[in-house]
Image: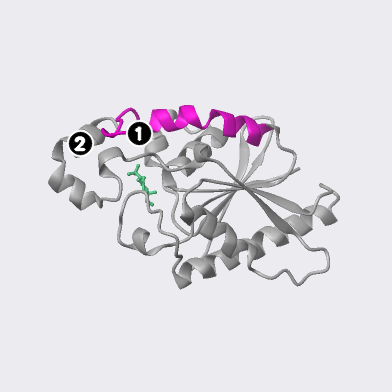
Amino acid sequence: QRSIWLTRHAETEDHLAGKLGSVREELTPNGHRYCRFVAEMLRSCKRQMLRAGETTDREVLVLLGTAPVHAATLNSLKSVPDVAEDRIHFTGMSTSLLNELDGGVCNGMTYEQIQREHPDIWEAREKDKLNFRYPGAGGESYADVIGRLRPIIIELERQRRSVLVISHLAVQRCLYAYFTGCPIQDTPYLELPMHTVVELRPKPHGAAVRQAHFDD
Ligand code: F6P
């Protein structure tokens, strides 16, 4: 048995300001507290698995996007001391495949700004959020993100190690939907709050799902 854990990156100032595609490096003090919660939770889950003889390694593989905020979240996790004898460590592998849905011309804007400055974009996205592709270089739709996540999904399917995926919301939604069998049309609307770890334990049909929320 092994787990796939999903978490959005920890809180940043940009995120608090409601800007799309927050990539600023610094986490808030609350963001760091969340990382401690995640590190302690994962290590404790992993130790339980080891003691139950379910797995042999002492490693959690961490897959993350290339944005500084992803690295900042991983570094904060890694900096949480492990005082137990059977130490569990985190090994990070970053890939742009896990970067957030690209907002094109709207990157770095708040929803209020988009509504005001690009009402046409706002309306078109409201009508078909799954297929709407943000205009501008690199702009993406949810359908685009689902397509680019295929190699990640194959890797997550074949991995025998426990894996933590750190990414932004849209990517989390797509991965969650795949492993839980959620209908594709519902994917862009899934509620996956900040500072919550989703644990997926793949089964022959679907996955057992648990959520652990950190109370800020
Ligand atoms: O946390 C904010 C965020 O990850 C943005 O960076 C991103 O554009 C947004 O969530 C995705 O949500 P939606 O597709 O509902 O706009």
Instruction: State left or right for residue 192 relative to residue 5.
Output: left
Quadrant occupied by the N terminus: top right
Q: Residue 25 placed where, x, y %?
A: 45, 60
Residue behind mark 2 = 121
Which residue is rendered at x = 40% and y = 28% of the image? 143
Question: Label 2 neighbourhood size at 10 Å, few (<14), some (14-19), many (20+)?
Answer: some
Q: Amino acid at mark 2?
A: Ile
Q: Mark 1 or mark 2, which has the lower sequence index?
A: 2
Question: Is label 1 in a helix, a strand or a loop?
Answer: loop
Front position in the image: 41 or 68: 68
Q: Residue 181 placed where, x, y %?
A: 53, 32
Q: Residue 60 placed where, x, y %?
A: 70, 51
Question: Is label 2 in a helix, a strand or a loop?
Answer: helix
Gap in angstroms between the C-alphas marked 1 and 2: 15 Å
Q: Is mark 1 within 8 Å of ligand 1?
A: no
Which residue is rendered at x = 35% and y = 34% of the image? 138
Per the image, is 152 magenta? yes
The range drawn in magenta is 130-157
Q: Residue 182 placed where, x, y %?
A: 48, 33
